[in-house]
Amino acid sequence: MFVIPQIQSNIISTSRLKQEKIDNSFNIDSNLALISSVGQQRALAAVIWTFTLLAGDIEHHNDPSVLSWMYYKFDNISKLDPYFYKNYLDGGLYLSVIKDDVLGAEKIYNKGLEIYPHDFWLNFYDGFNKYYELNKPDEAIKRFEKIIFHPITRRNFSYISSLTARMKSQQGSIEESYKLIEALYLREEKENLKLRYYNMLNSLRIEIDLNCLNSQTYPQSCRKADLSGNRYLYKDGQWISSVKWKKFNVYKRKKKKEEP
């Protein structure tokens, strides 16, 4: 504890840290830290974690060309103690929500998921970060697919299942979206959720059928009615549904209004 601050100026990675906290940052080069820790990597990781929390700020990270100073702290901790779970979970959340360093958050989440690939919360938060902040729907879908049938999802976050299906539909995988919702519908025991899944299935079924009827030269092979038995109508040169329906899309989060 005494020696580290004395040699800090010689071992800090100043070439990478172009943030306001450089001069006062308790950030030890990970390679040197591994050598100097003399087998006490976990203890040193805990010390750096404590200093990071004490020195943490709430200033937004506005330069996408570099990563925030706190990212390098969490990254070094992960090298010293790869199994430090809270470093990935709380570190990723801090970077994404507080610092607005969404790229740094993604990197920390990815490192955590290498150690805990099936963890609910790491997949959950990384999925949202990838979809809503980084515009990576395909990667977000992979995260959510890992936790769709997780007990926590079924108990408290059932919307993740429908969100994943909507994302698949928006990416053009309507048939896959239908199969996913169908599997959830067959497994669900609660009547209110079962009805909700049924309505989703019907919307997907109508979209799939109308695409089939309107895009093929010989629509005889396509279904002529939705799941409720309502037959499709041929009007003004195209097939339409005889009942009102909504396309199964992702509900986009509204953008924040910029302050004047």
Image (cartoon, grey):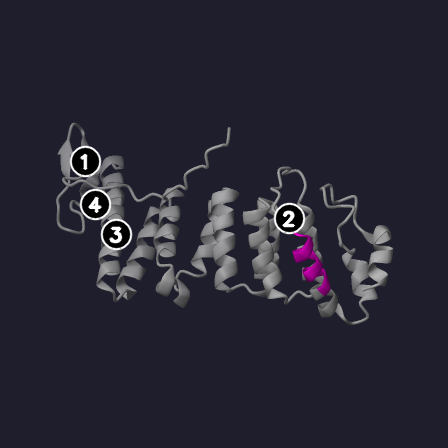
In the rendered structure, which disc, 2 or 3, sits on the residue that comes first in sequence? 2
Which of labels 4 and 1 is toward the front? 1
Q: Is residue 107 above or below residue 82?
A: above
Q: Which region shows up in magenta? A: 47-56
Mark 1 residue element: strand
Between 144 and 101, the one lying in front of the other is 101
- The CA distance from mark 3 to mark 1 is 19 Å
In the rendered structure, which disc, 4 or 3, sits on the residue that comes first in sequence? 3
Q: Is residue 54 magenta?
A: yes
Q: At which x and y percent is residue 202?
A: 22, 49
In the rendered structure, which disc, 3 or 1, sits on the residue that comes first in sequence? 3
Which of labels 2 and 4 is toward the front? 2
Q: Residue at x 51, y 64 (%)?
A: 119
The numbered disc on residue 57 is: 2
Mark 4 residue element: helix
- The CA distance from mark 2 to mark 3 is 46 Å
Residue kind at label 3, given as amino acid type: Leu
Q: At which x and y percent is residue 137?
A: 46, 46
Residues at discs 2 and 4 in contact (Cβ within 8 Å): no
In which quarter of the view is residue 3 placed? bottom right
Q: Is residue 19 magenta?
A: no
The residue that disc 3 covers is 201
The residue that disc 4 covers is 221
Residue kind at label 2, given as amino acid type: Asp
Q: Is residue 50 left or right of residue 93?
A: right
Q: Is residue 11 left or right of residue 254?
A: right
Q: Is residue 150 visible?
A: no
Mark 2 residue element: loop
- The CA distance from mark 1 to mark 2 is 58 Å
Q: Is residue 208 above or below residue 44?
A: above
Q: Is residue 191 left or right of residue 121?
A: left
